[in-house]
Image (spheres, rainbow, N blue to C red):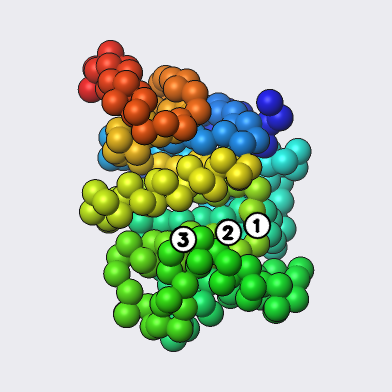
């Protein structure tokens, strides 16, 4: 498989004070291939979200090398990184971070308009197509205060996909949702992945991770293990995948 994202020996150190520092990432190596669905697990404070931010160019590693689609992100300036994030990456967070002064469809269209690589009609048509596919077309003109948490997360996914990114990053995208909404969102992520988009997400939930091709586990800023589960494509196999994953987690001492 073709490599789309890699990190080699990345470290991230935060300065707490002039005499005190905290190392959140310690010599982490990862490789993600095009079309993979990868999750990162670990206890709170393990560095899993920091890893996502550093490999996506949202933050800068203190040392090491990050490459995305053959381009080294670590040497880019802020303007170059912003352009890549806008055009080639999509982001979904635990909270939707939508703009209150824009309605649903305008929130979705905004990154497309900012990218300036397609006409407004093409972007608008894609936004309505995405909303239809995700079952929220009927709330297109609603304010964001007129939608449920599950609907707003679907809006966030539409927004993340508006520029047809090569990779979709999710930081606890199901963390604030109830069980049904979380399952619906994961089904959407799987559908997106099946259509060719690479996905990397951070999660604490084994039920979410069990639907991923590969699961990485972090502790104290280090990537300590990973497991290959293969493609998930049948609900009937989910229990077996959850059993395999939970046994692996127990073997790690969790």
Q: Earlier in the sequence, mark 2 or mark 3?
A: 3
Q: Residue drawn 42% across and 46% down?
A: 187
Q: Which mark is residue 134?
A: 3
- Could you say which is closer to the camera, residue 26 or residue 182? 182
- Residues packed near mark 3 inside 10 Å, few (<14), some (14 to 19) or many (20 plus): some
C-alpha distance separating marks 2 and 3: 12 Å
Q: Earlier in the sequence, mark 1 or mark 3?
A: 3
The residue indicated by pointer 1 is: 164
Q: Which mark is residue 161?
A: 2
Q: Which mark is residue 185?
A: none
C-alpha distance separating marks 1 and 3: 15 Å
- The quadrant holding residue 247 is top left
- Can the viewer see residue 111? no
Q: Is residue 154 left or right of residue 7?
A: left
- Where residue 175 appears, as percent x and y from the top left, is 30, 50
Q: Residue drawn 59% across and 29% down?
A: 31
- Say whether marks 2 and 3 touch (CB < 8 Å): no
């Amino acid at each position: 498989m073709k490599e789309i994202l890699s990190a080699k020996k990345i470290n991230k150190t935060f300065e707490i004070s002039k005499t005190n520092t905290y190392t959140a990432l310690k010599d982490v190596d990862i490789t993600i291939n095009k079309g993979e669905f990868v999750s990162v697990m670990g206890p709170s404070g393990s560095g899993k979200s920091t890893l996502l931010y550093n490999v996506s160019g949202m933050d800068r590693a203190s040392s090491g090398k990050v490459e995305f689609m053959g381009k080294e992100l670590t040497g880019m300036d802020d303007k170059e990184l912003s352009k890549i994030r806008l055009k080639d990456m999509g982001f979904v967070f635990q909270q939707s971070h939508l703009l209150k002064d824009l309605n649903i469809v305008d929130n979705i269209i905004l990154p497309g308009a900012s990218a300036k690589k397609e006409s407004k009609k093409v972007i608008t048509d894609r936004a309505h197509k995405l909303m239809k596919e995700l079952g929220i077309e009927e709330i297109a003109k609603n304010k964001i205060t007129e939608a449920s948490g599950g609907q707003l997360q679907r809006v966030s996914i539409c927004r993340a996909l508006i520029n047809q990114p090569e990779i979709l990053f999710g930081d606890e995208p199901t963390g604030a949702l109830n069980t049904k909404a979380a399952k619906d969102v994961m089904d959407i992520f799987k559908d997106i992945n099946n259509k060719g988009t690479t996905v990397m997400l951070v999660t604490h939930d084994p039920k979410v991770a069990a639907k991923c091709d590969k699961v990485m586990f972090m502790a104290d800023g280090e990537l300590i293990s990973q497991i290959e589960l293969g493609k998930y494509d049948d609900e009937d196999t989910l229990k077996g995948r959850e059993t395999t994953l939970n046994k692996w987690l127990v073997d790690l001492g969790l």
